[in-house]
Amino acid sequence: MNQQSFNEYLLSHLEINPEESARLLAEVQQTKLSLPKILQKEGIIEERQLSRLVADYFSLPFLERKDYPQKPLILERISIGFLKRHCILPLEQSKDEVIIVISDPFDLSLMNTIKQYFNSVKVKFCIGLPSEIKDAIDRLYGDQTEEIQNAMGEAEAEVFELEEENLRDMALEAPIVRLVNMIINRAVEMRSSDVHFEPFEKEFKVRYRIDGILHEMETPPKRLQPAIISRVKLMAGMNIAERRLPQDGRIKLRLRGREVDIRVSTLPTIFGESVVLRLLYQETEELELDSLGLTERDMALLQEKIYYPNGIILVTGPTGSGKTTTLYGVLKKIRSPEKKIITVEDPVEYQIEGINQIQVRTDLDLTFAKALRSIVRQDPDVILIGEIRDLETAEIAIQSALTGHLVFSTLHTNDAPTAVTRLIDLQVEPYLISASLLLVVAQRLVRVLCPHCKAPFKPDKAIIKRIRTCFPPEAAEVIELDRKDITFYKSVGCPECGHTGYLGRVGLFEIMEVTDSIRSLIIEGADTSHIRKEAIKEGMTTMRLDGLKKVIKGITTIEEVLRVTKL
């Protein structure tokens, strides 16, 4: 049976006249779309009718929605990821037979693969609607909780008494390997940035950081703690016998079609080693400047300054505020065959084509300062320094800027004006800061409301009052709150966002241009408040106000803005 004979079967059963049939078949040739897709697109056939005809053509049973199982099968030979990718679902399994619902019986390769999975039993197929199969998979296996719980049970059954000498063997046992793989797979599926394995006196917890917030997901049995931690350490190339000192390692995996670079950090605590996995996804489509959430004014200002031939541009904020993403977005924007760009990072989080990236190695005494001294002899046009941590690094960065290089770097400060104070605290001379500093970008990340479930509401007087106490009353955004038709949005929660009400994150920014008046204030030794007032006077939007703009646009909530911009 082939697609061509099915096309003829389809056209005859739909009683389509010869002229229309010829037109449709010509469109198949032209567009390279299948005939069923064209028929659905034009509204000639519905999904259910099409699936019934497919079932009749192959003499296979058609599955109605009511016949889908209420409880998931325990899958030993097939992954949930495979079910989702190929839109198939196991319905029943006995000692010598398994029934599988599929949507595309033309995929002979898939059907053979399924038969190989269940090579010891007979496989029977039936046909279902693609949408109903996907719904059933999400309902039955969406959170993978049962699968992970089963893996925990298997692993625990294997663990009796763990001695020092058999710890390595235990970490290589199939149940432990499967359990750790499942935890990492689930983290990737849920868009986690970090996975925390945390030992406590009577518990061993696993938590995922999703959109900047930690969520407790699994609590493996306490007795599995040594085996799980040893397994992670083995994967990261660490010394599993060393439990008294912190260690760092790295795992490189391909999961669910994505390249994932995992940085592993261990830290000894009184109840065992705490392990944190930082997941770095290698796709760089998110590292685009246009997708960061900048206002028109800020985007125009940033785009102007990043093409300057020399000077320093600083990005500031706490750990996890998206500084690296912003800097990589900038580098992707300005890279060209005419420019040599060199970075010094700790660690190199993303690899960008066309850019020379250097990894700091403190174990080899390759520090930021040492790398920078060598970099300036490599004739770069643009230098990125992962972080200015001390006077030596700051001085080299400023000297580089003053001798014709454009320098990007980061600082840990709460806002843009405080970056000046921080450099002075590092003993950098104010006149050098004034002469070299072009721009300071301060930022935070807030969670974005899920577009699938966010709900509009009219803010009441209590919310308006709270906003007025947190924002300057003269701000245009605050004045806009008096509009009677103003609408806010609140988080609700749905399967698409994991019932959190949020999906993804966006930046809140304040960008301070170092103008002539601000340069004068720096040389005069003005404090942060004076510099901030002058920057606002010259058009700088504070992070809080930027957040309020995004609240009014329905991007995030006022709670999120106030959470990340606490003064």
Image (cartoon, rainbow, N blue to C red):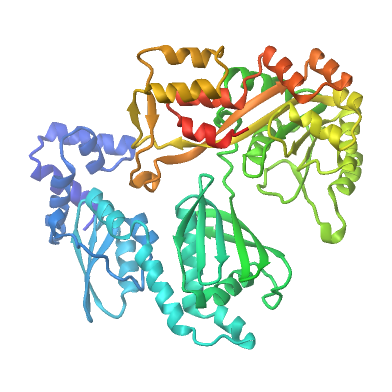
Q: Is residue 267 left or right of residue 474?
A: right
The C terminus is located in which quarter?
top right
Query: Is 165 rendered above or below residue 491?
Result: below
Residue 181 visible in the snapshot: yes
Describe residue 278's horizontal placement relative to residue 203 as left or right. right
- Answer with the quarter of the image where residue 323 lies: top right
Q: How many marks can you see?
A: 0
Q: Quadrant of the N terminus?
A: bottom left
Q: Is residue 462 above or below residue 168?
A: above
Which residue: 34% across, 23% down?
458
* Residue depicted at x 90% and y 38%: 396
Query: Horizontally, is 120 left or right of 65 in the view?
Result: right
Q: Judge by depth and name the residue closer to the eye, 142 or 159.
A: 159
Classify 388 as above or below 114. above
**Front residue of 321 and 424:** 424
> 250 above or below 533?
below
Q: Residue at x 62, y 40 (%)?
A: 321
Across and down, in percent, residue 478 comes to 50, 16
Residue toward you, 437 or 133: 437
Q: Which quadrant would residue 151 be assigned to in this image?
A: bottom left
Q: Is residue 333 visible?
A: no
Q: Position of residue 37 (x, y in %)?
A: 25, 41
Q: Position of residue 121 (x, y in %)?
A: 26, 78
